[in-house]
């Protein structure tokens, strides 16, 4: 008599593709140690609702696990004597040292953040808010 024992998992062939293992699974955790941080728009305050706030782009860097580059933007704090740094999605045409303006009365130039009602139809936009104040939800590429 011959007995043949086989387990169903030993006969699988092929390899796991690394890019496909980044989902929710018990066998893989994505490596987030080198990620730069959460990319969000500036939170809306009084100055941004009524006029505009000026910021300067300090650095444009690559964020692993993200397709678009990330810009580190520095703003003056409106309430204390300090500076706030925000991470935003870098739009095409941004450069370090560039001044960007966020607010209702900001002009329509590359990198500025303004309400969608102030943007003409057909303009290329990125990082659009789904609801006012959620700091960016749609089209988060550059």
Image: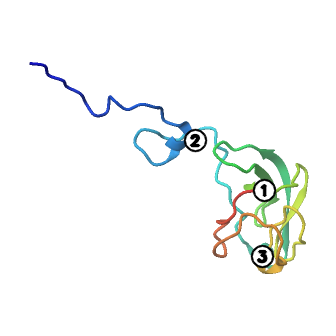
* Gap in angstroms between the C-alphas marked 1 and 2: 29 Å
Which mark is drawn over residue 32?
Answer: 2
Element carrying mark 1: loop
| First along the sequence among labels 1 and 3 | 1
Residue at left offset 46%, top offset 39%: 28
Where 63 sits versus 109, above or below? Answer: above
Dot 3: within a 10 Å radius of its alpha carbon, few (fewer than 14), some, or many (20 or more) residues? some
Answer left or right for 94 relative to 2. right
**Image quadrant for the C terminus?**
bottom right
Q: Report the coloring of the rendering.
A: rainbow
| Residue 25 x/y as whole percent | 42, 45
Residue at left offset 77%, top offset 51%: 72
The residue to which callout 1 is attached is 82
Along the viewing direction, whichever of 96 and 77 lies nearer the viewer: 96
Where 52 sits versus 85, above or below? Answer: below
Answer left or right for 140 relative to 51. left
Along the viewing direction, whichever of 45 and 123 lies nearer the viewer: 123
Residue at left offset 66%, top offset 48%: 66
The residue to which callout 3 is attached is 115
Along the viewing direction, whichever of 142 and 94 lies nearer the viewer: 142
Q: Residue furthest top?
A: 1
* Gap in angstroms between the C-alphas marked 1 and 3: 26 Å
């Amino acid at each position: 008599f011959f007995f043949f024992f086989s387990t169903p998992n030993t006969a699988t062939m092929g390899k796991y593709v690394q890019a496909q293992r980044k989902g929710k699974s018990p066998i893989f955790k994505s490596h987030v140690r080198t990620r730069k941080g959460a990319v969000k728009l500036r939170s809306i305050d009084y100055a941004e609702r009524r006029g505009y706030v000026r910021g300067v782009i300090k650095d444009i860097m690559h964020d692993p696990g993200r397709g678009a580059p990330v810009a580190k933007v520095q703003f003056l704090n409106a309430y204390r004597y300090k500076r706030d740094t925000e991470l935003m999605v870098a739009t095409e045409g941004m450069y370090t040292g560039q001044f960007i303006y966020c607010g209702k009365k900001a002009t329509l130039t590359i990198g500025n953040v303004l309400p969608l009602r102030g943007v003409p139809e057909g303009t290329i936009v990125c990082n659009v808010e789904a609801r006012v104040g959620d700091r960016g939800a749609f089209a988060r590429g550059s």
